[in-house]
Amino acid sequence: MKLLNDLTLEQKVGQLLMCGFHGQHADEQITHLIRDYHIGGVIYFRRNVESVDQLTRLSAELQNMAAEAGALPLMISVDQEGGMVARIDKGGMTQVPGNMALGATGNPEYTLECAQILGCELKSIGIDMNLAPVVDVNNNPLNPVIGVRSYGEHAESVAAHGVAAITGYQSQGIAATAKHFPGHGDTAVDSHLGMVTVPHDRNRLEQMELLPFRKAIEAGVDAIMTAHVMFPSIEPEPIPATLSHKVLTGLLREEMGFEGIIITDCLEMHAISKPYGVAEAAVRAVEAGADLILVSHTLQDQVAALEAIVEAVRTGRISEEVIHQAVERIITWKRKRCGQQNDHLVSPKASETVEATDVEPVDCTESTKPTEPSVPNELTLFKIASNSITIVHNDGLLPLDPEKDVYVIWPEVVQRTEVDEPWSHTESLGIALSQLRGRVREHIITTQPTYDEADRIWADVSDSEQVIVCTYTSAGHLPKGQQYLVEKLSKNHSLIVIALRNPYDLLEISRPGSYVCTYENTPAVVRALSQVLTGGLQPTGSLPVRLR
């Protein structure tokens, strides 16, 4: 095996980059990055996925390309958080519940079970790293980017579920990534769009934001992702955590003792790219202590980041020893997780070899392989959904009266955002209810209905005896059209309102007759919800956040 010192500077710096691309096969962009720039990792998005089989072939194609180029094996990653954030939504990949649904069950064993199922499936299609779990404590109702991606607002509960997820993923040979350090939960701005500040003092940060990360480190988490958020009580300069030496090296490495990989959130996000530019931010992130630089989309930015880091080393701005240490950590991780490609790995030092960490994966049986969803997995998802659905209050409207007709208003997700993507296969509540009882009418709207559309629905609903309005919010506020619709209908009807994603929707409408939270609209949840509404199932979920 070659020694780490035998790698060129460009090869070492390449290992520090994780990049995305736009094709469903090895296109010109990713081929250029692997063959010519020796990048260390690849990240998949929905745009890369046609099917599970196709993605399996793509993973093998990329690894073969790296091997043929004499490069180290790639770390292949994805954001497969569960619930409403799942890059792979095709048949054969289990749609595990999201974090807040799991938090509502109050049972971390469910979180462990889901992570084991998902970890096994990801590993079998050539993915080595999941950029999950989110361990941000969501205690700000207006948070537009975390929300149901969090297990809840209680740090101890978030920590317990986070450790369960980490244990589940890593038992299957998948690197878990706790994010977003030091904490993105108490923010009201999306860092994809602009700069964010968490102004709390250090005592508050210790009790709330930092606790889940400390527990994740104790659990042996492989990686921690940084937040593009400013923390003035840790870093007095007006710079985000991703670029702060005090945060990444002083706090995370030295004080908290984290020895794994520090990966940045994507540097193309506006909180970073607008004030600094991607190339300069990449240099600053390495200076701050990051090992792995994530640039998800644009080839020009990816190449600029690589070349800027190389130039910073050549001019003495960054010590080559800093690069050396980061690559050592990456190689150590690859020896542990990229088992099939270990023959291509270099030794960190002439006098040292790195042994793969003992991992005891569960048997990836037919019930967890990525073919069609299995009966055991379906039963697990239904059980968890049943234990997550939360009836916040009920003024006698539930269960539904079987002798009366039902009118359902269902919002369909059609617009993609950074934290919300339309599902390739969905099941509406009206369809699910109609299978259990007759006389169900359904009106499907977008998540941004116009006032005119709301007026037309109001006229259509006038004779209905039982009205269910489903709301859907992927940002910090319930869209105005949905607010208007609920308020107008509530003047003539005692409504059953079901928050399909954000439980905080209740804060922006008049108190309905009944209010139910599901935290997501995945098929298992919709099927369980139909049973709840018709009285066939008694849900046991508890709100993991306060509606204040």
Image (spheres, rainbow, N blue to C red):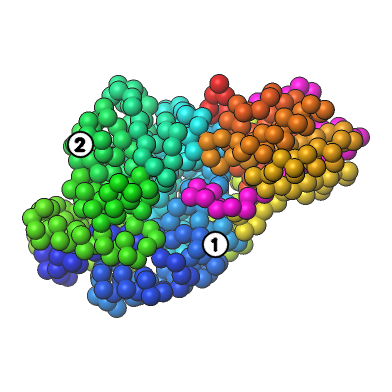
- The quadrant of the image that shows the N terminus is bottom left
Q: Is residue 418 left or right of residue 339?
A: right
Picture coordinates of residue 511, whole percent (x, y): 69, 23
- The quadrant of the image that shows the C terminus is top right
What secondary structure do most residues of the magenta stretch adopt?
loop
The label number, if any, that marks residue 350 in the structure image: none
Which residue shows up at 34% across the image and 66% down it?
Answer: 299
* Residue 9 can be seen, yes or no: yes
Label 1, on which residue?
A: 370
Label 2, on which residue?
A: 246
Picture coordinates of residue 287, whole percent (x, y): 18, 48
Three-letter residue code for mark 1:
Pro
Instruction: Using the image, determine if residue 199 lies above or below residue 364.
Output: above
Crowdedness of circle 2 by 10 Å Cα count: few (<14), some, many (20+)?
some
Picture coordinates of residue 100, whole percent (x, y): 53, 37
Depth order, front residue of 68/13: 13
Three-letter residue code for mark 2:
Lys
* Residue 526 can be seen, yes or no: no
Q: Earlier in the sequence, mark 2 or mark 1?
A: 2
Quarter of the image where one finds residue 50: bottom right
On whether residue 406 falls in the magenta region, the answer is yes
In the orientation shown, which residue stands out farthest toward the bottom?
A: 68
Q: Nearer the viewer, mark 2 or mark 1?
A: 2
Picture coordinates of residue 17, whole percent (x, y): 28, 59
Look at the image and give the residue range highlighted in magenta: 392-421
Which residue shows up at 87% across the image and 35% down it?
Answer: 462
**Discs 2, 1 touching: Cβ within 8 Å:** no
Depth order, front residue of 56/422: 422
Which residue shows up at 48% across the image and 50% down it?
Answer: 418
Which residue shows up at 64% across the image and 44% down it?
Answer: 448
On whether residue 276 falls in the magenta region, the answer is no
